Amino acid sequence: MKKLNIFGYFLSILFPITLFLSYKGEQTLSYIIFIIFIISMFSRENRKNFKSLVDKKLSYGLLIFILSPFIVSFFNGGILSRVDIEHYLFWLIFFPLVFYISTENRFWKFIFSFLVGGIISLCITLIIFINNYESWVNPNGFDYPRIYFELQTQDFANIMCILLLFLLSFILFYEHKDKLKNKIIKTVLSLFFLLNLFIVIVNRSKMVYICLIPAVMYILYKKNKKSILGFLTLCVGGYFFLPSSIRSRLQYIIKVKDDPSSNLRLIFWDAAISSFKKNPLLGMTTKERINFNINHFKSRGVWDYIAVNYGISDEIGLTNTHNMYLHHLAYYGIAILTLFYFFFVIIPFRISKLTFYKTKNMKFSKYTAMEIGLKSSYIAYLIQGITEYNLNKKPMIFVCVIFLVVLNFMYKKIINKNI
């Protein structure tokens, strides 16, 4: 079993890198890691170690969240009656990752792997931007070319937003005892941060712009409250220095009705709320939602608008709510309670128990940086969910699982008083 455990650990270290570089590779890797984990659990010693590594409340909350859609579907239409319901099973990769990322050394290698994957992706994306600059700088009407690599456009933007927050947190809070090394580390991280910021800006995701403001404000609040005013001033002043191709898109954060991308979301949200009102207990199956949404859109007089600006050839696409809360509500009804319990009770409660920031000890500065990064990125994640359904999109599941693995490790370190 020892060799198998080492192999599982090796694959787990590759997991964060693959997140950025290969959509299919990440999915395949998750299968292999989980199979190895299942085999490893036949060992009594491994089971004992696993129980000591995983936080019970976090794991039970996650399991309830995963199982509730299947339970609701079982009683209403059948287990596979909702599109992509099987994607919820990818959340289970949390358990093998917790088992294999078991020591401090492994933990920081895992974090470094996430950084390396992100940097490689950013560099490739920069090349893509340079090669496609002419089309990017000259958008055609409401068609704004987006810059991204490998992942879907919005998934890429959301994940790079999270990476940006962690980089900023480490720049501001990490301190190395060797002053020269500290300067080198801060300089390198700052360069990566600027590259990340540039890519996030040229990606032109309106929601990422929005969610970054409160998330960055939280980081600055923890570092120096006075800097918040400077940040807000920079945001306002910086707007006028942005290329017109970005400013023209930013205006639709306010002029929602004038932008098909934003207005369509309002239409889909309205349909989700209406479908929930019709079946609030167990939600609707995909077939039921397709029929309901088509009739709803026609009754609202927006069917032709959707046909022109979104398309109606893919009927399943008409059920995409572009909101992780309303989507869950429309499909699973009362199961929304498990979502809120896990994401708004269990996780915040565990995050609030992280107190590395209060130690003021340079020895734990990297944990302080990680703590602030976790809290700020979670703020961003919850806001991102307003316009995207992140709960069963595999890349966003994987990045949230990585978040949970980090939270689990740091929480266990706190309660075991290893600080």
Image: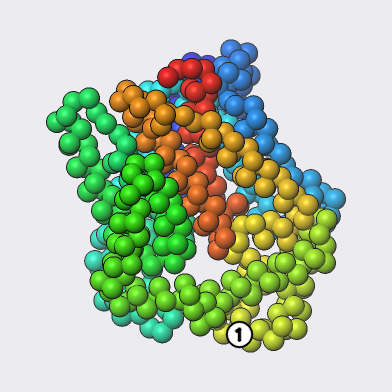
SS class of the residue under badge 1?
A: helix
Kindly identify the amino acid type of the residue bearing the numbered disc 1: Tyr
Q: Residue at x 27, y 31 (%)?
A: 175
Name the residue at the front extreme.
Answer: 226
Q: Is residue 81 visible?
A: no
Q: Quadrant of the C terminus?
A: top left
How far across and down, in percent of the image, does residue 172 sit? Answer: 30, 41
To which residue does mark 1 refer? 305
Name the residue at the right extreme.
Answer: 75
Q: Residue at x 42, y 56 (%)?
A: 212
How far across and down, in percent of the image, does residue 346 sit? Answer: 63, 37
- Is 388 placed above or below 100 here? below
In the depicted view, which residue is nearer to us: 233 or 347?
233
Instruction: Answer with the quarter of the image where residue 91 lies.
Output: top right
Q: Is residue 91 left or right of residue 117?
A: right
In the depicted view, which residue is nearer to us: 349 or 125?
349
Label 1: how many residues lie within 10 Å, few (<14), some (14-19) or many (20+)? some
- Is 292 placed above or below 192 here? below
In the depicted view, which residue is nearer to us: 228 or 1?
228
Name the residue at the left extreme.
Answer: 180
Q: Is residue 382 left or right of residue 125?
A: right
- Is 59 placed above or below 261 here? above
How far across and down, in percent of the image, does residue 80 sit? Answer: 74, 53
Q: Is residue 236 left or right of residue 277?
A: left
- Is 222 placed above or below 164 here? above
Q: Residue at x 66, y 84 (%)?
A: 302
Q: Residue at x 53, y 36 (%)?
A: 351
How far across and down, in percent of the image, does residue 328 sit? Answer: 69, 56
Name the residue at the top extreme.
Answer: 45
